[in-house]
Image (tube, helix red, strand yellow):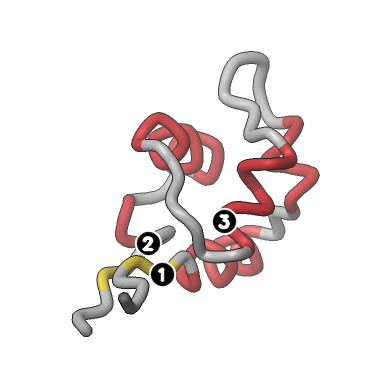
């Protein structure tokens, strides 16, 4: 089965905003993204909607700035 969700926009948004994985792990007190979650994102694996919400808050962006749907 093909993966239909891509996190490629996340890496572009992070670069545009000057954010790193360190930023994701350490930004704020309650929205921190764990190292294992970052690995899941890098491998294009599934993450929770809570994680997607936290990414949007940390990067101050829309969901479409971090994920895209790719039809198979």
Q: Which residue has dot 1 on it?
A: 6
Q: Are marks 1 and 2 in contact (CB under 8 Å)?
A: yes
Residue that numbered label 2 is attached to: 67
Task: Give the spatial CA distance, label 3 vs label 2.
Answer: 10 Å
Q: State the SS at label 2.
A: loop
Of circles 3 and 2, the one toward us is 3
Q: Position of residue 68 (x, y in %)?
A: 32, 68
Q: Residue at x 66, y 22 (%)?
A: 28
Q: Is 2 above or below relative to 42?
A: below
Q: Is residue 31 left or right of residue 63?
A: right
Name the residue located 27 percent from the left edge and 78 percent from the top edge: 70
Cα separation between marks 1 and 3: 9 Å
Q: CA distance from mark 1 to mark 2?
A: 6 Å
> Disc number at residue 41?
3
Is the C-beta separation of discs 3 and 2 under 8 Å? no
Residue 58: % across, % down? 55, 37
């Amino acid at each position: 089965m093909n993966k239909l969700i891509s996190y490629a926009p996340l890496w572009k948004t992070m670069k545009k905003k000057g954010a790193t994985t360190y930023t994701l792990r350490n930004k704020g007190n309650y929205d921190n993204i764990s190292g294992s979650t970052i690995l899941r994102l890098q491998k294009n694996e599934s993450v929770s909607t809570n994680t997607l919400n936290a990414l949007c808050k940390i990067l101050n962006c829309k969901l479409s700035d971090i994920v895209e749907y790719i039809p198979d």
